[in-house]
Image: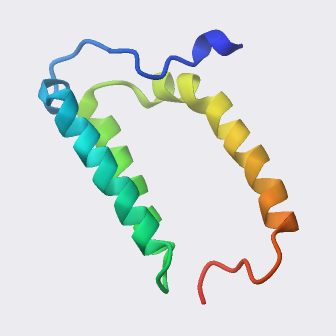
Amino acid sequence: MFKNISLGVYYPGNSLLHHLQARTKLLILFWLVLFLIIANHREWHFAPYIIVATLACTGVAISGISPRHIWQRMWLLTLFAILGAIPTLMFTPGDTTLYK
């Protein structure tokens, strides 16, 4: 089961994302995380998540890696994230709505 998780494995290709330097990709990731942290403290904080999901789908499309292959690698991580979110939503005191 854990053989399918290959985070950080390089897939050879000839796309724009493959030609970027590793530090450029890390810098973009840093800015996206910072953007989401700041946006989470504002009204309509769910809108940046839609933008990031769109950017991720665009990255998958231009990378040349099939979405099916990515899903085969990410399904277990997605399952763990959902299972971790359930107790957080159930046992967090206060208001847990998407907007204020």
Q: Residue at x 42, y 54 (%)?
A: 53
Q: Residue at x 36, y 60 (%)?
A: 34
- Total residue callouts: 0
Q: Position of residue 94 (x, y in %)?
A: 79, 82
Residue 18 falls left or right of residue 9: left
Tell me which colouring the rendered structure shows. rainbow
Residue 44 falls left or right of residue 96: left
Q: Is residue 54 above or below residue 8?
A: below
Q: Where, quadrant-wise, is the C terminus in this rendering?
A: bottom right
Q: Position of residue 54 (x, y in %)?
A: 37, 55
Q: Where, quadrant-wise, is the N terminus in this rendering?
A: top right
Residue 46 falls left or right of residue 61: right
Query: Is residue 53 or residue 32 the one in the foreground?
Result: 32
Q: Is residue 51 visible?
A: no
Q: Position of residue 86 (x, y in %)?
A: 81, 55
Q: Is residue 40 visible?
A: yes
In the image, farthest residue toward the bottom: 100
Query: Is residue 27 or residue 65 the one in the foreground?
Result: 27
Q: Residue at x 83, y 76 (%)?
A: 93
Q: Is residue 64 above or below residue 81?
A: above
Query: Is residue 95 or residue 63 the one in the foreground?
Result: 95
The picture quadrant where one finds residue 16 is top left
Q: Residue at x 33, y 15 (%)?
A: 10
Q: Position of residue 50 (x, y in %)?
A: 44, 64
Residue 90 falls left or right of residue 25: right
